[in-house]
Amino acid sequence: EFVDLGGVTDSRVANMRGDHVDREIDVAYLEERGVTDVVLHSVRRPFVQDGRLRHIDGYPTERRLARREWLQLRFRVARLSRPAAGYWYVHLTRDSALDSL
């Protein structure tokens, strides 16, 4: 199961404030859904430090979520991939050791 951050296939996300690529995602909803993995896109190589995502140049929804304390404290970068020039994916996975935060 996945959560579509654009809201195309998820009516709760579609009703969150903002437009398709500029939504304000409620992390309480992501917690409720039990999200264990997050995939974000970036037009430049994401900046990763000590296994943590520090910066991406993606859509506003993705940039905003990447800066959230919820993601910063609970998720680690599992993989970077570059399927095409100027297009990167960063796959983050939940660090279960930090779930008590």
Image (cartoon, rainbow, N blue to C red):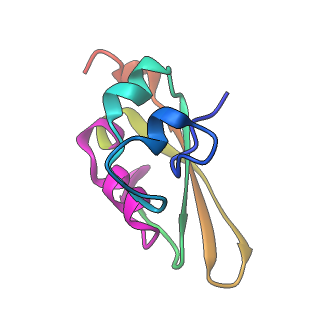
Q: Position of residue 16 (x, y in %)?
A: 36, 42
Residue in the foreground of this view, choosing between 20 and 1? 20
In the image, farthest residue toward the bottom: 85
Residue at x-position 46% and y-position 33%: 12
Q: Quadrant of the C terminus?
A: top left
Q: Where 74 sits versus 90, above or below?
A: above
Residue in the foreground of this view, choosing between 63 and 99? 63
In the image, farthest residue toward the top: 100
Tell whether 64 sits left or right of 32. Answer: left
Q: Position of residue 18 (x, y in %)?
A: 34, 56
Q: Where 40 sits versus 25, above or below?
A: below
Q: Position of residue 62 (x, y in %)?
A: 43, 58
Residue at x-position 42% and y-position 18%: 32
Residue 59 painted magenta? yes
Q: Quadrant of the N terminus?
A: top right
Residue range (magenta): 49-71
Count up the numbered dots: 0
Tell whether 43 sits left or right of 64. Answer: right
Residue 97 painted magenta? no
Residue 49 seen anywhere in this rendered image of the structure = no
Q: Quadrant of residue 85?
A: bottom right
Residue 37 seen anywhere in this rendered image of the structure = yes
Tell whether 72 sits left or right of 37. Answer: left
Q: Quadrant of residue 67?
A: bottom left
Q: Position of residue 73 (x, y in %)?
A: 30, 36
Residue at x-position 32% and y-position 43%: 72
Q: Where 17 sits versus 57, above or below?
A: above
Tell whether 85 sits left or right of 38. Answer: right
